[in-house]
Image: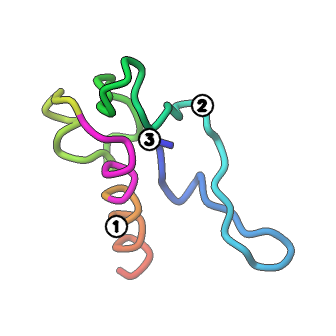
Amino acid sequence: HRDIKPDNIVLDQNMHIKLIDFGLAAPIEGHDGSGMLHTSCGTLKYMAPEQHLLRPYAGEKVDVFALGVTLFMMYT
């Protein structure tokens, strides 16, 4: 997904969590098949450190980081 944040999380009529806005989504295997992504994209406050440092990253790991930031924001 690469842009998990409160604005991209909604609830459906049964109160199930849904992600929206897949405009920055990328394949899990990466664009070159290595499993790593190289494009720094997303919302700055929710981006993982490796994205800020312009290092290659695994998409699913930066999504977990962004979800953690989102949950922390909700909690506080």
Q: Given the image, on which type of amino acid does mark 1 rest?
A: Gly
Q: What residue do we see at 48% from left, 54% from top?
A: 5
Examine the image and state in which quarter residue 69 appears. bottom left
Q: Nearer the viewer, residue 25 or 68?
A: 25
Pinpoint residue 37: horizontal percent, then vertical percent.
32, 28
Q: Given the image, on which type of amino acid does mark 2 rest?
A: Gly
Q: Which residue is mark 3?
A: 2
How far apart marks 3 and 1 lie (CA) works out to: 13 Å
Q: Given the image, on which type of amino acid does mark 3 rest?
A: Arg
Q: Which residue is mark 1?
A: 68
Sequence-earlier tag: 2 or 3: 3
Residue at the front extreme? 33
Q: Which residue is mark 2?
A: 23
For the record, the magenta segment spans 57-64
Q: Nearer the viewer, residue 46 or 60?
A: 60
Sequence-earlier tag: 1 or 2: 2
How far apart marks 2 and 3 lie (CA) works out to: 9 Å
Q: What residue do we see at 37% from left, 56% from top?
A: 66
Pinpoint residue 13: horizontal percent, then vertical percent.
86, 73
- Against 71, residue 48 (above or below) is above
> In the visual, does 14 lie left or right of 48?
right
How far apart marks 1 and 2 lie (CA) works out to: 21 Å
